[in-house]
Amino acid sequence: MCGIAGFTHLKKGPDPDRIWEITRALIHRGPDQQGVWESADVSLGAVRLKIIDLEHGDQPMTSGDGDTVLVFNGELYNHMELRRELEQAGHRFYSRCDTETVLHAFLEWDLEAFRRFRGMFAAAFWTQSEKRLVLVRDHMGIKPLYFARRRENIYFGSELKAILLHPEIDRSIDLAGLADYLSLNYVPGPRTLVEGVEKLPPGTWLESRAGVVNRGEYWRLEFNPDPKRDLESAKDELDGLLRSAVREQLVSDVPLGVWSSGGLDSSTILHYASETARGRLKTFSVSFQGRSFDESQYFREIAQAYGTDHYEFDLNPGADLAGVIEDIPYHSDEPSADAGALPVWFLSKMSRRHVTVALSGDGADELFGGYKTYLADRYSQRLRRLPTGVLRFGERTARLLPCSNEKIGLDYKITRLLQGSLLDPVEAHFFWNGTFSRGQQGDLRNGWDVPASIEAGRRGRAATGLSRFMCMDQLCYLPDDILTKVDRMSMAHSLEVRPPFLDHRIVEFASRLPENLKIRGGRLKFVLRELMKDRLPRSVVRRSKEGFDIPTHHWFRTILRPLLLDTLNENSVRESGILSWPAVDAVIRTHLDRRANLGYHLWGLVVLFLWMKHWGITAPVRAEEHQAIPVVLRSSA
């Protein structure tokens, strides 16, 4: 695992210190080795967390003739298979590291090499003789890659800070991105919250030749369910795919463990890992002792069943919650209003004391239908048959329910379901996990009127039924919320996290499953539960998903109240120029007075303002300058 950064300077020489400054800013991603490569046209930097072949593989890595240079972040799990093919074609290797395989694959097959890769990765290739830069990102967006264009030059990096450190980049907030953030709790790609900075979409590449840019896809998520697929054959195929993916992702020259929540997904990964791993596995968990959503009994049962060396951290008000929350904006770069970032921070910190690599169960919910929001999509479809007046009356009545201190109490669920049932089905699906609907943003915005796009998710319209929403989650929520959160919080502690469920072969398998093998009645992740029902403890297979975040509603009324009021004060809000103070104050007072549970709304606002303060992000001069970022893709074939 590594961090990469670079920029072209085609019409002027490089600033001799800048690439080192940017590279050092990523050192948490790669504390074991740092290096740079410069020419008159480009500066490249890389930091390395050594996982495979600890003695070799330093970056940047150059070809034998010195003409092509690579900086690479991630892991290529099928690199030995590709290496054998390349050796037959005449290539010679001098290490066991996958970075060398990536470089030789590009030299042999150019853009077509990306179709052969299996792993999680972001990479940049520079060919000096052609003044050609190629950027590429893995199939599902597990590894991040940001870039910006200024005239003929490209600036890129694994984290947004690698771009913000350039004086050519204005630190102005993108209002369309902000509209999305307020609705969704994250910004769907390719947009970011900084004007003119983009995320390279998963499964795509970008090429710049002497300043002329082309973009294309090497892989695309397609939903083609086979209605004739039966349960037994699906179980058999999934069993083989999981066994293969986990076996490949256990390869490491440094200590490795498994994140365990005691839920179906992480327990499945632990099961397959235990079949292959040599010696006792280490497992890591976060508890919330004394809370109704504490999962201790389940992950302890799993740890005992598989005989792991088990470690756990209890996340409670005695931890330095406010201090960590104030640290998060530096590492997250672009704010995410996912409160799950806090337990992932503590989980990563604890894990890194014992291992360098951890396997996770991320991705299974999006692939196999594990979120209760899919049931909400189904229920709301029925509720929309009622007259709008009846729904509005029900929503007003639900707001009279007492506000609970639960993480997600019955009052919150009922109110949210009724509010979402008044929205368009696509907006409603995002609303279940989001905060402010587009209508609710009206008073919050300080005189600007840029619509929330949510356009990235509308590509899910290619699918039908609940598959449509799962497709949208895989295109948006997974890469731009879940995977972003895990990458930033884990890499803040120099920990590599691998999600075997997101092997693109498993993703493709899931996209071909009919809906009734994912959700049957009220049973979520049906095929996965059926596969594991005789392998895992019954208590694990049968229990519902809890969700990995914090009791935001309660903590903002208690332990985090000082942070809330200090961050969202009148001066800060008015000086930002982006939000209306009376509207923000109304949200705060409504929550503190227990008239509604708005903890998730407030979390997003707190993280946003901490981020703006840390990075010096300002409001744009004119909102009308913010236009949609065009994304034109062409095949690499």
Image (spheres, rainbow, N blue to C red):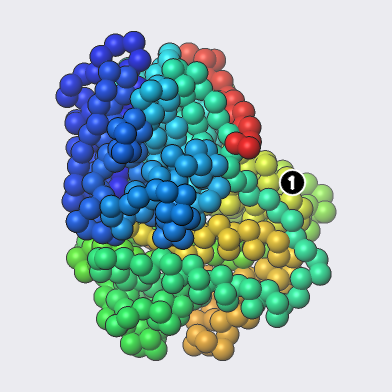
The residue wearing badge 1 is: 462
**In the picture, residue 305 is in which quadrant?**
bottom left
In the rendered view, does 304 fall on the left or right side of 114?
left
| Image coords of residue 562 (percent x, y) | 26, 47
Of 237 and 340, the residue lying toward us:
237
Secondary structure of the residue carrying tag 1 is helix
Q: Residue at x 32, y 19 (%)?
A: 41
Q: Which image quarter: residue 258?
A: bottom left
Image coords of residue 461 (percent x, y): 73, 45
For the C terminus, the quadrant is top right
Give left or right: position of 526 versus 256.
right
Residue 4 left/right relative to 102: left
Q: Examine the rendering and report whether any part of residue 187 can be seen.
A: no
Q: Nearer the viewer, residue 146 or 210?
A: 210
Q: Position of residue 230 (x, y in %)?
A: 76, 75
Residue drawn at (68%, 74%) of the image: 234
Residue 484 is situated, as x and y percent measured from the top left of the image, at 42, 48
165 to 368, vertically: above or below: above
